[in-house]
Every structure is written in C-alpha cells, then in structure tokens.
Image (tube, rainbow, N blue to C red):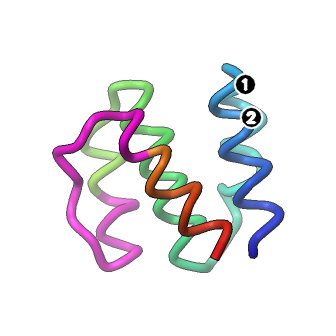
Amino acid sequence: MSSTALKALELARSGDWEGAHTLVQDGSDSLSALIHGYLHREEGDLSNAAYWYRRAGETLPDNTLTEEWQRLYQRAQA
C-alpha cells in the first residue's frame, strides 16, 4: 500500500489539486506517474497527462475521471 499515493488521491478527490500534485511530482515509481498523469488529465492538460502515462508504461486512458480515480485508488491499496 502506498500511503503517499492514497493521500494524493484523497486530496485530488477533495479538490486540492495543488496538494495532490506536490505529493506525486517528485515520485519516481509508476503509480506516482499515473497519478501525476491523472491530475493533468483532470485539469485538461492532455498532452502532459499522456506524457506521464507513458512514463508509467501506459497509454492515456479513455475512461471517465471517476473511473480512473477508482482504478488508481484500488491500485494504491494493493
């Protein structure tokens, strides 16, 4: 379980984009990169989001932001 990832996702869900971004921006693991990508996707910066998803070895998803948040939260809990 990644407490930093969970905290970042909880901050994002509560509307604290900056706080969530601060937690993951220096992370070097794939989950941090995915959350970083999610956050940029949430703000509408899709090119930056795609970059972060690629860094994590994934492509930009076509699911909803809610679905992606849930997917990332489940992954952070594992």
Q: Is residue 5 magenta?
A: no
* Residue 24 placement (x, y as % from top left): 68, 57
Question: What is the tally of numbered marks visible in this picture?
Answer: 2
- Which residues are drawn in magenta? 51-68
Image height check: is 6 above or below 39? below
- Is label 1 in a helix, a strand or a loop? loop
Instruction: Tell me the residue that label 2 is attached to.
Output: 11
Instruction: Tell me the residue that label 1 is attached to.
Output: 16
Image height check: is 28 above or below 16? below
Residue 10 in which image quadrant: top right
Mark closer to the chain start, 1 or 2: 2
Task: Indicate the quadrant containing the C terminus: top left, top right, bottom left or bottom right.
Answer: bottom right
Furthest-left residue in this view: 62
Which residue is located at x 73 percent, y 55 percent? 6
Q: Are marks 1 and 2 in contact (CB under 8 Å)?
A: yes
Residue 14 in which image quadrant: top right
Mark 1 crowdedness (10 Å alpha carbons): few <14, some 14-19, many ≥20 = few
